[in-house]
Amino acid sequence: MSPKPRATDVKDRLVEAAIRLLDDGGPESLQARKLAAEVGVSTMAVYTHFGGMAALVDEVVRTGFRKLSAALAEVGESDDPVADVFSLARTYRHTVAEQPQLFAVTFGQIAPGGKRATLSDLTTEAGREAANEGLEAFDHIVRATERAIEAGRFRPTDKYQAAAQLWSALHGFVTLEASGHFGPGEQGIDHILIPLGITLSVGLGDTVERAGRSAEAARAAWRAKTRNARQGGND
């Protein structure tokens, strides 16, 4: 007789199955019956381990933010904080584009079965204290913004509000691109995202020339990263 799976194993498998269903079929596919069939358990397992679909959606949201934060953490820090802002933007865009349905749920843009995650205002101290999701991912943008302010590239300002402006523009681009408004492939990155980043950097206190050089540095770093990834996959 095979051993009975641990509760944590079943919970993890349900979350993984929920993300697969989202990726393959969108929010309409996220149903207790389909989840149970995907994992090979009864529908009661969803309620036993989560209390209902709403709590499961919340866990999917947390998983999405953890995935995003892990990807942004890989960017690291260079001696050019504005280039790091551009690198974070590219990584953010790439991560969200890989699993658009997951991140539409993560950011509350869609609500499977009417179950939308409740998020906090990360630009306020009270909101950050109450936040369960998103704070760690947002902090990567905040840290790069803070370093740009300290380096004199951005004018002295509230780092959270400045980072939220960058995040708003970035996520707006990602959302519109996912809807097909900027054409196929990645052409919107060069035509829209990078010029947008330069414009915002200048608005926050940088010069056009320095922001442009930082954008080019980030572009070169991204190309080297993707080239190394391809070569590593061929080893």
Image (spheres, rainbow, N blue to C red):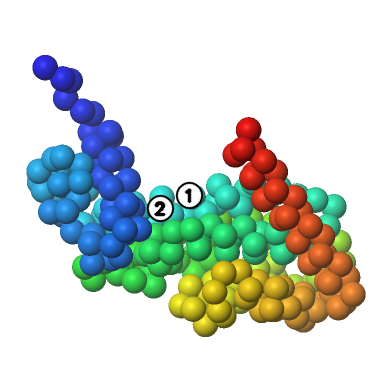
Q: Give the residue at the far front of this rendering.
A: 234
- Please indicate whether residue 208 sits to the left or right of residue 59 in the image: right
Residue 2 location in percent, x, y?
Answer: 16, 20
Few, some or many C-alpha atoms within 10 Å of disc 1 (few <14, some 14-19, many ≥20)?
Answer: some
Per the image, the residue denoted by label 2 is 62
Of the 4 image quadrants, the one containing the C terminus is: top right
Which of 96/53 is in front? 96
Q: Is residue 93 visible?
A: yes
Q: Is residue 119 visible?
A: no
Residue at (66% x, 79% y) in the render: 192
Residue 89 location in percent, x, y?
Answer: 65, 64
Of the 4 image quadrants, the one containing the N terminus is: top left
Few, some or many C-alpha atoms within 10 Å of disc 2 (few <14, some 14-19, many ≥20)?
Answer: some
Residue at (11% x, 48% y) in the render: 43
- Quadrant of the image occupied by residue 31: bottom left
The amino acid at mark 2 is Arg
Q: Which mark is residue 66?
A: 1
Residue at (90% x, 75% y) in the render: 209
The amino acid at mark 1 is Arg
Residue 175 location in percent, x, y?
Answer: 50, 74
Q: Are marks 2 and 1 in contact (CB under 8 Å)?
A: yes
In the image, residue 111 above or below residue 231: below
